[in-house]
Amino acid sequence: MLTDTIAAIATPQGRGGIGIIRISGPQASDIARKLCQRDKPFTPRYAHFQHWYDDQGDTIDHGITIFFDGKQSYTGEDTVELQAHGSPMLLQALFERTLALGCRPAEAGEFTRRAVEHGKIDLSQAEAVAACIDAATLRAAKQAQKQLDGALGRRISQYMEDLTSVVAHVEACLDFPEDEVPALFYDQLRNRVETELVAPIQHQLNSKLGERLFEGATVAIVGEPNVGKSSLLNALSGRDRAIVTDIAGTTRDTLEVDFEVHGIPVRLVDTAGLRNTDDVVEQEGVKRAKSAAETADLIIFVADVTRPETWNPDPHFGELNIQLKVMNKMDQVDQVNIKGFLPLSTKNHQGLDALVNTMAQCLGDVNLADEAAMVTSARHRAALEASLTHIQAGLAMLGREDMIDLTAMEWRSAWSALGEILGIGDVELILDRVFSEFCIGK
């Protein structure tokens, strides 16, 4: 497959000032020269102003042609970029001409896949390319850049080196009689594994911030009617999205608004007030409110300080984990004991900043010692969890002479699980799964 030369339009559909076509493969330079009707070789990494011609010798378009040799290209093989005018018609004509000259259309993510297969980047960096494109917030984009720079890959590689070392130590015990391996050796090895592997991997898994930066989080606002749920949604989003009245039961359905909490994309869901009612429509709203709360990453329970009967969530939400409770309408009282609640006034926005900060903490926004190596996808989490399981299984058997080989086997399995993050192991299966989600031209 890598003997083919591929081409794709690398810019989004639609009209623009510039459109880019990428060509990569062993025939990239020759095909580009035919396209330009140029005899001389291209100077690598130099912008050549060229006309591009069809098979009749007529000009399709003109613009910049840049050639990168394999040592300095993104894919690790000869690559050409054509920077043309951003007309969809011209780009399509230019792209079809590259196919006629010997290219084939690139598959989804194939340029980045070739970069992985040529050792230019590891698989975690390749995933970061897609994350950079899809980042919904600036913080998510910055985190993707850290992963693209190799921060996560370096951390995983260190784990794998440590596992290689401890496996070697364990297997060395097979060459000695049982009574010649001191207990202190196993104690020191156990301490090393727990310190260098178990603790840092568990630390990474404990935070869900990385995944939420890219996948977002859902926050449900719940409570009884007229406690200020819709007013809170409007205050947090900065928009009058929800209808606010003094009439109980105004909100009959869920209402969703997207906004950011410390760079975390959040979908805020306003729900119907929970109460017993004979209104069929309102009953359906209550049902949907409970459903939204059950699937939310965070539930905000809102109470009205002037109505003590609204303070207890147990009648409706006793079985759910409510991490954040808010006491609204604090502007209407002088002093009241609201232990366990965050004070708030949606009317004058008193306490709103404190609420946003607490929401961020509940969603995992804590001060991490090494934020660059955060887990950012379900695939990475599954691999780390599998690796940790194998490491702990090996620890449970460490020191038993009849299980030395099993200990080594578990730790080798842990190494293989980590290798999947970098694309080591069943490479084709892993690559097919990852690059199926990429866009064409990247």
Image: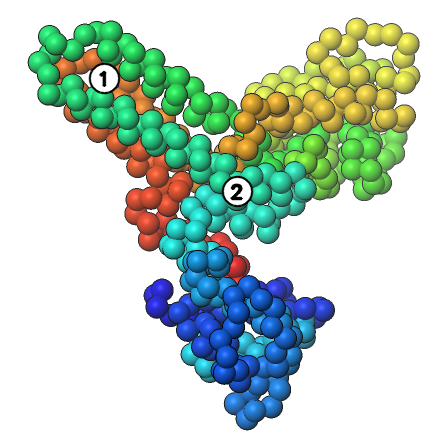
* Amino acid beneath label 1: Met
156 vs 302, left or right, is: left
Question: Where is mark 2, residue-wise?
Answer: 149
- Closer to the camera in the image, 94 or 81: 81
Q: How far across and down, in percent of the image, does residue 260 sit? A: 71, 37
Res 6 label? none
Q: How far across and down, in percent of the image, does residue 427 sit? A: 33, 49
* Amino acid beneath label 2: Asp
Question: Where is mark 1, residue-wise?
Answer: 397
Secondary structure, mark 1, is helix
Q: Quadrant of residue 315?
A: top right
298 vs 55, left or right, is: right
332 vs 276, left or right, is: right
Which numbered disc, 1 or 2, marks the residue that appears first in the sequence?
2
Q: Local crowd at mark 2 within 10 Å, few (<14), some, or many (≥20)?
A: some
Label 1–label 2 contact, CB within 8 A: no
